[in-house]
Amino acid sequence: MSQSKTLFDKVWDAHLVRPETADTPAVLYIDLHLIHEVTSPQAFTELRQRGLRVRRPDRTLATMDHSTPTTPRNALGVIPVIDPQAIAQLDRLRANCAEFGIPLYELGSANQGIVHVIGPEQGLTQPGMTIVCGDSHTSTHGAFGALAFGIGTSEVGHVLATQCLLQYRPKTCAVRVEGRLQPGVTAKDIILAIIAKYGVGGGAGHVFEYMGEAIRALSMEERMTICNMSIEGGARAGMVAPDDTTFEYVAGRPYAPKGADFEAAVAHWRQLPSDPEARFDKEMFLDASTLAPMITYGTNPGMGMPIDAAIPAPEHMPDASSRQALDKALSYMGLEPGKLLLGHRVDVVFIGSCTNSRISDLRQVAALWKGRKVAEGVRVMVVPGSQQVKRQAEAEGLHEIFRAAGAEWREAGCSACLGMNDDKVPPGKYAISTSNRNFEGRQGPGARTLLASPLTAAATALTGVVTDPRTMLEGALAGA
Amino acid sequence: MEPVTTFTGKVVALVADDIDTDQIIPAAYLKVTDKSGLAEGLFQAWRYLPDGTPNPDFPLNRPEAAGATVLVTGRNFGCGSSREHAPWALQGYGFKAVIALSFADIFRNNSLKIGLLPIVVDEESHRELLSHIEEDPETTVRVDLPNQQVVLPGGRAVSFPIDGFAKHCLIHGVDQLGFIQQHEEAIAAYEAATPARVNTLHPDGGA
Ligand code: SF4
C-alpha cells in the first residue's frame, strides 16, 4: 500500500485525538478557534447552561466585524454604534469574552477587523494547523496550508468546551491551475472561473487543494482570495501547499514563532506539501493563461462569465432546472439574455470583504484611481479588511487617492458584503462588488450584485458602467 | 435535543436548486443573541410582499400548506453561509425534515446537530413525490428514521442515507457534546503530546 499522503491527509492525521471508527466520527483537535459576535452568543449560553468553562481560551480569539458599523470615528475617536440590536450583540460578545477569559479585538481597537483578515495578519494562521470559526469563509486560512473550515453554532459550543470536533474524513479534490495570468486578470478571476466551470455544488464533500504553476506564482493575499471562495464552489475547505512565499509572509508577525523556533517550524512546514504520488478523489482543471476578467450576472457565484461575454440564455441551458434557475436569476437581476454586461450601468461600487480588502487589493484600486474621479452618481465604498490594513493604507497615502477620486474611505468590517449594518445596496440597484456572494438580497433587500475583482470594480467605478479593466491597464500596472 | 424517530407529516414543495442560507434566513435576522424571531424571518424575501403582507403565491403561504412539517426542495439546499440560524428557523417554523436531491455540507451538519432531518432521495423518487404533491397539495409522507425510509403516498418506501452515528444520536437524543467530553482523557493526552501551535493570550513566542 502506498504511504503517499496529500497535504490534507497530513494535517488531518496530525490532529486525530481519536480516529474514525465504524460507528463514530473522528475526534479532531482544533488549534485555533476564531469567534465573532453573530454566530457565538447561543453557544456561550449553552456552555453556561451546562456549567462548562472554555477549555482553551489560549486557543481562542474573538473579534467584532459582522454587525459593526463602518462609519467614521467621532471626535473622541470612537466608532459610534447606533443600532440597538448590534449594541446588544456586541455587548454580549464583550461579556462572554470577559467571563470566559477569551482575548477580544474590540471594535475600533488596533487589531480589530474581519475575522479572516486578522488571523493571517497576526501570524495566528500558520501552516499545518486546524482552524475553525462559525463562519463559512474560514476556508480563507487554507491559503497557508492549514485545514480551515466553517462550522455552525452547535459546533462552536463543542470547540469552546472541548477544543475538539466530531468529523468524518472529507474527500480530496486537486484543483490544478496551469499557465500564467495575463495582465488585468487576477486571483479573483481564477476562483470565479473555477466556480463558473464546476458549479456551486461541485466541491461538496471535498477539500480542495489548489496547485499548479498559476497558484505557485501567487502572493499570499492572492492565495487567500482563492481559498476564501472554496465554499462558493461547495467545498468546506481549500488549501495551498506552504512554500517560501508562505514562510516569508508568516515570518515576523506577532504570533509567529521567532528565531530558532521559526527555523524549526519551517523545517516542519516543508514536510507538509502533498507527496508526488499522493492520490486525490477528484480533479479539476483551469488554464489561467487564457482567462479573461470574470463577472457574475446571476444570483449565485457559479453564474459567472468572462467580462466580454454575452449573458447566457435560459434556452441554452442543459436541463429544466438550470433553465428555471437562470430565468429566475435574470428576472431578479433585471438582465436580458444574449446582451452584454459590458457598458451596463452600476449604482454602487463596493471594495471590501474577506475576499478582497487586503492591502494589495487597495493598492491595485488606488493605482487605477490615482489622479482620476469616480463617475458621477455612483456611490463608491472602500472598506479595509482590518484596522491594520487601514493604517497601512493611510501610511501609503492610499486613502487620499480614494477620497480625491470621490470614494468613501470607511472603518474596517464586513460592511456591504452582507449588509448587517447600514452599508447596503438599495433595492433594485446594481452593485459591482469585490465580495463573494451575489445571492438575492445579500447586499440589502432587492440589491443586485455583480461579483468581480478589485481591478474590474475599480475600472467600473471610474466609468459608472461595467468596464473591462484591461482597457485601462497602463495606470494600474504602473502603480501595482 | 428531542429524539427523532418516526412521524407522518404534510409536505410542501419549494422546487429550486441551490437555495442558500441567506434566502432561508436573511442577515437582518441574525442580530439576535438567542433563537427568537427566526421563524418569522424564514424565507422572508420570498414569503412576504414589499408591504409586509404574506405573498399568496409563495408555496408556504398557500392554505393547503398550513401545518406542513416536511419541506421538499432541489439540489444543494442550504449552500452559502454557515449560519445555524437557517436550520433553527426551519425548525422554529415547524419543519422536522427536509427532502432534497442534495445538501450543502455545513447545512447538513448543522441540521443533524439540532434534529432537523436532512433526507437525500434519488431523482426518480423526487419526481414521484412532486407529482403526488401536485395532485394533492395536502400530501403526507411517513418518515421512518430507524429504517432510514421515506414512505411515499403510493406506499413506496424510499431508502435514504444517514451516517450511523448521527442516526444513533437522533433516535436516542444523544448529546454530541457529551460524547466528545467522554474522550477527555484522550484530549488531555493529545495536548500533552503535541506542542501548542499558537497561544492567543501571549503573542511573541508565548505559545
Ligand atoms: S466579509 Fe462577508 S463573507 Fe467575509 S466574513 Fe464578513 S460577512 Fe462573511
Image: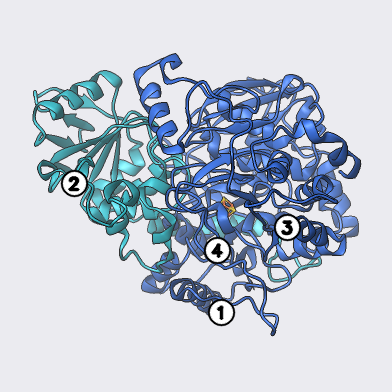
Chain colours: A blue, B cyan
Single out the mark in the foreground, 4 or 3.
Answer: 3
| Distance between the alpha carbons at the discs numbered 1 and 3 | 41 Å
Residue A18, given in percent of the width and then of the height, sits at 52, 46
Kind of residue indicated by mark 4: His
Q: Is residue A3 left or right of residue A426?
A: right
Nearer-the-camera pick, B84 or A322: A322
Q: Is residue B171 left or right of residue A169?
A: left
Residue tagged 2? B61
| Distance between the alpha carbons at the discs numbered 4 and 2 | 35 Å
As drawn, the residue found furthest toward the bottom would be A76
The answer as to whether the residues below labels 4 and 3 share one chain is yes
Residue tagged 3? A406
Kind of residue indicated by mark 1: Ala
Residue A399, given in percent of the width and then of the height, sits at 79, 61
Residue tagged 1? A98
Count of numbered circles on the image:
4
As drawn, the residue found furthest toward the front would be A376
**Mark nearer the N terminus (1 vs 4):** 4
Q: Is residue A393 visible?
A: yes
What subunit carries mark 2? Answer: B
Nearer-the-camera pick, B186 or A388: A388
Q: Kindly indicate the quadrant of the structure image that contains residue A84.
A: bottom left
The answer as to whether the residues below labels 4 and 2 share one chain is no
SS at badge 4: loop
Residue tagged 4? A36
Single out the mark in the foreground, 1 or 3.
Answer: 3
Single out the mark in the foreground, 4 or 2.
Answer: 2
SS at badge 3: loop
Looking at mark 4, is its residue's CB closer than 8 Å to ligand 1?
Answer: yes
Nearer-the-camera pick, A443 or A17: A443
Quarter holding the C terminus of chain B?
A: bottom right
Label of residue A265 in the image: none
